[in-house]
Amino acid sequence: MEMKINDQQLKIAFKDALFELFNENKNFVKSTFVEVIEDIAMGKAIKEGDKNDLVSEKEIFEILDK
């Protein structure tokens, strides 16, 4: 017996599966989202850093010590 599913049924099933995944794994989804945002920010910071002159280690530690 072959089971057929139309596009609308598939769409509803996919939405239900995603909803269930997010509800059951809220911490995983949240931490994954945070990591993605951090990675994007790091990539932007690296690009911005490539545009500027190098800074000495001493200058960096002086800023961090403030």
Image (tube, helix red, strand yellow):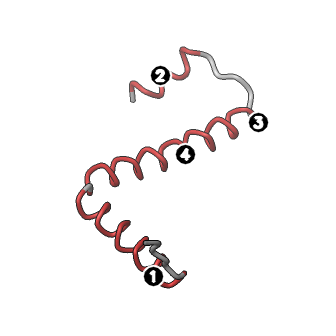
Distance CA(mark 1)–CA(mark 4): 38 Å
Q: Residue furthest front?
A: 1
Q: Secondary structure at mark 4?
A: helix
**Residue identified by numbered label 1:** 9
- What residue is pinned by disc 2? 62
- Disc 3 from disc 2: Cα separation: 22 Å
Q: Earlier in the sequence, mark 3 or mark 2?
A: 3
Q: Between tags 3 and 2, which lies in front?
A: 3
For marks 2 and 4, give the CA distance: 23 Å
Mark 2 or 1 closer to N-term? 1
Q: Please report the residue visible at 26 percent of the width from the left and 57 percent of the height from the top.
A: 26
Q: Secondary structure at mark 3?
A: helix
Q: Quadrant of the N terminus?
A: bottom left
Disc 3 to disc 2: CB gap under 8 Å: no
In the foreground, 41 or 32:
32
Given the image, on which type of amino acid does mark 2 rest? Glu
Instruction: Provide residue 53's location: percent of width, then percent of height.
Output: 74, 27
Q: What residue does disc 3 label?
A: 51
Note whether 31 is above or below 47 in the view shown.
below
Lower position in the chain sequence, tag 2 or tag 4:
4
Closer to us: 35 or 26? 26
The answer to which of marks 1 and 3 sits earlier in the sequence is: 1
Can you tell which mark lies on residue 41?
4
Judge depth for marks 2 and 1 and give the one in front: 1
Give amino acid for label 3.
Lys
Q: Is residue 54 above or below residue 38?
A: above
The quadrant in which residue 3 appears is bottom left
Q: Is residue 24 above or below residue 13?
A: above
Q: CA distance from mark 3 to mark 4?
A: 16 Å
